[in-house]
């Protein structure tokens, strides 16, 4: 299986978990400790999603090929 497909499935599952945590929080929690636990879960899932996104972005940037133009060294006629 393609690694990007696996990563996509992991991202989808993490987003589902965030939605479930949000749903539980909207329905109400019994005490402050449970609330703090749920907030921590949501933050952890969000951080993992962000790290995956950052890693994918770096890979995409490294794979891009193109022309680099140095805008600081333009030839100007006086």
Image (cartoon, helix red, strand yellow):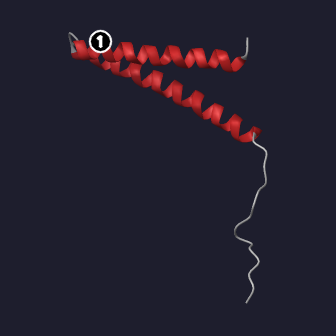
Q: Is residue 33 above or below residue 71?
A: above
Q: Residue at left 74%, top 81%?
A: 76
Q: Quadrant of the C terminus?
A: bottom right
> Which residue position holds label 1?
24
Q: Is residue 44 above or below residue 27?
A: below
Q: Is residue 12 left or right of residue 38?
A: right
Q: Position of residue 29 (x, y in %)?
A: 23, 12
Q: Residue at left 58%, top 31%?
A: 53
Occupied quadrant, residue 11: top right
Q: Position of residue 45 (x, y in %)?
A: 47, 21
Q: Position of residue 64 (x, y in %)?
A: 75, 42
Counting every numbered tag in the picture gives 1
Occupied quadrant, residue 32: top left
Q: Residue at left 65%, top 15%?
A: 6
Q: Is residue 74 left or right of residue 6?
A: right
Occupied quadrant, residue 33: top left
Q: Quadrant of the N terminus?
A: top right
Q: Is residue 14 left or right of residue 26?
A: right
Q: Residue at left 37%, top 12%?
A: 20
Q: Residue furthest bottom?
A: 78
The 10 Å Cα crowd at callout 1, few under 14, some 14 to 19, many 20 or more, is few
**SS of the residue at dot 1?**
helix
Q: Position of residue 31 (x, y in %)?
A: 21, 13
Q: Is residue 63 above or below residue 32?
A: below
């Amino acid at each position: 299986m393609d690694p990007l497909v696996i990563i996509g499935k992991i991202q989808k599952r993490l987003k589902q978990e965030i939605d479930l945590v949000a749903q539980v929080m909207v329905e109400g929690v019994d005490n402050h400790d449970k609330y703090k636990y749920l907030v921590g879960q949501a933050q952890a899932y969000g951080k993992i999603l962000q790290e995956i996104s950052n890693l994918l972005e770096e890979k995409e940037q490294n794979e891009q090929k193109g022309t680099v133009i140095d805008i600081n060294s333009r030839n100007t006629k006086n």
